[in-house]
Image (cartoon, rainbow, N blue to C red):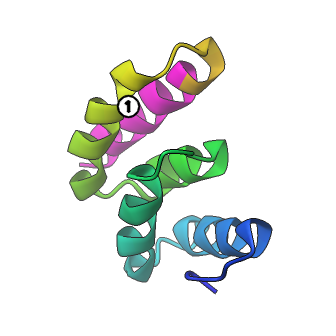
Amino acid sequence: MLTDKNDCARIEAISGLAERKDNRVITAIIYELQKNIIFDEVIISAGILGDIKLHPILKNILNEFNDEDVIGNIKSAIQQIIKYN
């Protein structure tokens, strides 16, 4: 499911595994965060998972967005990661 072509199914799988703190999802989140189109759910999942490996990636993409909601989600995810580590 993590490589499903269907966006909804793939994002649902990522979100579910992140909620369960399943580290198998780290690679999928990193891959999704490096795409041209990034779903809010992936950013939120990165924060929920809280793995420090995601911190520099989120910091790098922070300046790529102008949308305040997306920026807020990224900042929130970064804060969650810092809190967990």
Q: Residue at x 22, y 56 (%)?
A: 53
From the viewer's perspective, tell me whether residue 65 is left or right of residue 27: right
| In the foreground, 71 or 32 | 32
From the viewer's perspective, tell me whether residue 60 is left or right of residue 3: left
* Residue 60 in picture, x, y percent from top left: 26, 33
Q: Say which element carries label 1.
A: helix
Q: Is residue 75 magenta?
A: yes
Magenta part, dominant SS? helix
Is 32 rendered above or below residue 73?
below
Is 68 rendered above or below residue 50?
above
Q: Residue at x 30, y 52 (%)?
A: 54
Question: From this viewpoint, which residue is outermost toward the bottom?
Answer: 1
Q: Residue at x 66, y 73 (%)?
A: 10
- Count the marks: how many? 1
* Residue 36 in picture, x, y percent from top left: 48, 45
* Residue 56 in picture, x, y percent from top left: 21, 41
Q: Is residue 78 magenta?
A: yes
From the viewer's perspective, tell me whether residue 5 is left or right of residue 35: right
Where residue 77 sits, quadrant-wise, is top left
Q: Which residues are magenta?
A: 71-85
Q: Residue at x 47, y 31 (%)?
A: 74
Name the residue carrying label 1: 79
Q: Residues within 10 Å of mark 1 (few under 14, many from 20)?
A: some
Q: Amino acid at mark 1?
A: Gln
Is 83 rendered above or below residue 69?
below
* Residue 48 in picture, x, y percent from top left: 51, 53
Q: Point out the image quarter for the N terminus.
A: bottom right
